[in-house]
C-alpha cells in the first residue's frame, strides 16, 4: 500500500514538473520572439542637409566704394568689458548702441554710443549667459515695437543640442538719467536647433521685413547660413532651415540694415557687403555676389558689426581679453 502510494506521488510530481517545464519554455520562446536581444547602442547619424553654394569666386570680389576706407575709432569708457562680442544700434533711442560680453560673463547688455561712453546696463533676469555671441535689433511680435535679440549661440565644441535667442522690447530712455541700470524681467526665449547637428556660430541677423532670424555658422573656410522663419515659437523647439553655404572663413558677426536692403558679414580679417536690388529677399540676396567693405584690421580680435540706425555707416567692435593693455574700441565706417 505504501509502495503504491509512493509511486502515485512520484508520477504526480513528474507530470507536474514536465508541464511546468513546457509552460515556461513556451512563454520564454514567445517573449524572445517579441522583444529583440539587447544590442549595443549606436550614435544616430547626422542628417544630410543640402546647401546651395554660390558660383562666384570669393577671391575675385570688388571693393565697395560706399564707405570711407578709414574708421573713426573711440575707446570704451568702461574698462571691465574685455570680451565684447556683438554690437547693434537702437531704433528708438538715437545714437544708442547695444553691446555685450560673451561666455561666462554676466547676463547683461551694455549701452554705449559711438564715442564709447557708458550709457547704462540692462540685466536680463530670466536667462543666463552660456555664450552670447551676437546681438541684433528689429521688429517682433507686437506691431510698432522695436526688440533687442541676443544670440546665445556660441558652441566651440559643437555639443549643444539647442541654441537660444533672447528677445525683449527695447526700453525707452527718453527722460531717464544715464547711465541707466535696469532689470529686464520679460524676455522671450526662442529655442532653435540646426537641421544637421550642433555647430558653433557667432552671427545673428534679423530681417526687418519678415522678422525671420538668420544664424551664420563659424567654420574654417565656410559659413552655413540658417533661417528660423517668423513666428518663432517660444514654447517649443524650432528647427531651422538651410539657406546657403558661403565660402567665408570663420564668421564672427553680421547685420541687416534697418531698411532690409544691405547685409554685412565679418570675420577677424575682412567684411563682406551686399547691396540688394529692390524687392530682393535676404535669402535670395545671400546667393548673390558681395563686395568687400572697408576694414583696416585695427582690432586685435574683431567680433561684432552693425549698421547705424540712420544708415550713415556701420560700427565694429573687438574683444581684448587676450591682449593686455589694449583698450576695447568701437570703430565707425562712415558712408560717403
Image (spheres, rainbow, N blue to C red):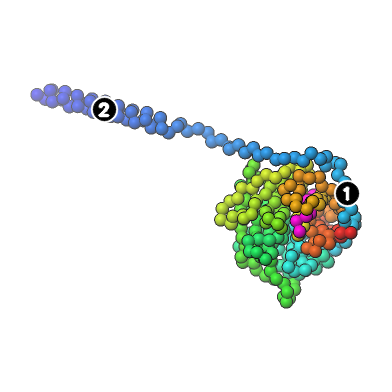
Instruction: Report the magenta residues as a range.
Output: 259-268
Task: Depth check: give the residue in front, 105 or 296.
Answer: 296
Residue at horizontal 19 percent and vertical 24 percent from the top: 11
**Image quarter hosting the C terminus:** bottom right
Residue 332 locus on image (x, y percent): 84, 60
Residue 62 locus on image (x, y percent): 88, 46
Residue 234 locus on image (x, y percent): 59, 57
Residue at horizontal 22 percent and vertical 27 percent from the top: 13
**Callout 2: helix, strand or loop?**
helix
**Magenta-colored stretch includes residue 125:** no
Image quadrant where residue 49 sits: top right
**Callout 1: helix, strand or loop?**
loop
Residue at horizontal 56 percent and vertical 56 percent from the top: 235
* Disc 2 packing (10 Å; few <14; some 14–19; many ≥20): few
Image quadrant where residue 175 sits: bottom right
Disc number lying in front (2 or 1): 1
Q: Which tag, 2 or 1, sits closer to the chain's start?
A: 2
Residue assigned mark 1: 63
Q: CA distance from mark 2 to mark 1?
A: 90 Å
Q: Residue 59: tell me if it is visible.
A: yes
Task: Depth check: give the residue in front, 178 or 205.
Answer: 205
Amino acid at each position: 500500500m505504501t509502495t503504491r502510494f509512493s509511486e502515485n506521488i512520484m508520477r504526480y510530481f513528474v507530470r507536474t514538473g514536465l508541464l511546468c517545464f513546457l509552460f515556461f519554455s513556451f512563454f520564454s520562446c514567445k517573449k524572445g520572439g517579441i522583444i529583440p536581444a539587447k544590442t549595443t547602442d549606436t550614435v544616430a547619424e547626422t542628417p544630410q542637409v543640402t546647401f546651395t553654394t554660390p558660383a562666384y569666386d570669393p577671391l575675385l570680389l570688388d571693393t565697395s566704394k560706399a564707405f570711407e576706407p578709414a574708421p573713426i575709432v573711440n575707446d570704451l569708457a568702461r574698462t571691465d568689458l574685455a570680451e565684447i562680442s556683438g554690437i547693434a544700434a537702437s531704433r528708438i533711442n538715437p545714437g544708442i548702441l547695444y553691446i555685450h560680453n560673451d561666455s561666462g560673463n554676466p547676463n547683461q547688455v551694455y549701452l554705449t554710443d559711438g564715442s564709447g561712453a557708458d550709457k547704462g546696463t540692462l540685466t536680463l533676469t530670466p536667462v543666463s549667459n552660456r555664450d552670447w555671441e551676437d546681438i541684433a535689433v528689429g521688429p517682433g511680435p507686437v506691431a510698432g515695437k522695436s526688440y533687442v535679440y541676443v544670440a546665445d549661440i556660441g558652441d566651440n565644441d559643437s555639443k549643444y543640442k539647442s541654441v537660444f535667442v533672447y528677445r525683449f522690447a527695447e526700453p525707452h530712455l527718453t527722460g531717464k538719467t544715464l547711465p541707466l541700470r535696469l532689470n529686464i524681467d520679460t524676455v522671450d526665449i526662442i529655442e532653435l536647433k540646426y537641421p544637421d547637428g550642433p555647430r558653433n556660430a557667432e552671427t545673428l541677423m534679423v530681417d526687418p521685413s519678415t522678422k525671420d532670424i538668420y544664424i551664420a555658422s563659424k567654420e574654417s573656410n565656410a559659413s552655413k547660413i540658417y533661417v528660423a522663419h517668423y513666428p518663432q515659437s517660444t514654447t517649443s523647439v524650432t528647427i531651422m532651415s538651410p539657406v546657403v553655404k558661403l565660402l567665408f572663413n570663420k564668421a564672427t558677426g553680421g547685420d541687416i540694415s534697418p531698411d532690409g536692403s544691405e547685409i554685412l558679414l565679418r570675420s577677424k580679417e575682412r567684411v563682406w557687403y551686399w547691396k540688394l536690388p529692390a524687392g530682393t529677399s535676404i535669402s535670395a540676396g545671400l546667393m548673390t555676389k558681395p563686395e568687400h567693405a572697408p576694414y583696416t584690421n585695427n582690432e586685435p580680435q574683431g567680433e561684432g558689426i552693425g549698421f547705424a540706425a540712420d544708415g550713415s555707416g556701420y560700427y565694429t567692435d573687438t574683444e581684448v581679453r587676450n591682449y593686455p593693455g589694449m583698450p576695447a574700441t568701437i570703430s565707425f565706417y562712415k558712408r560717403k
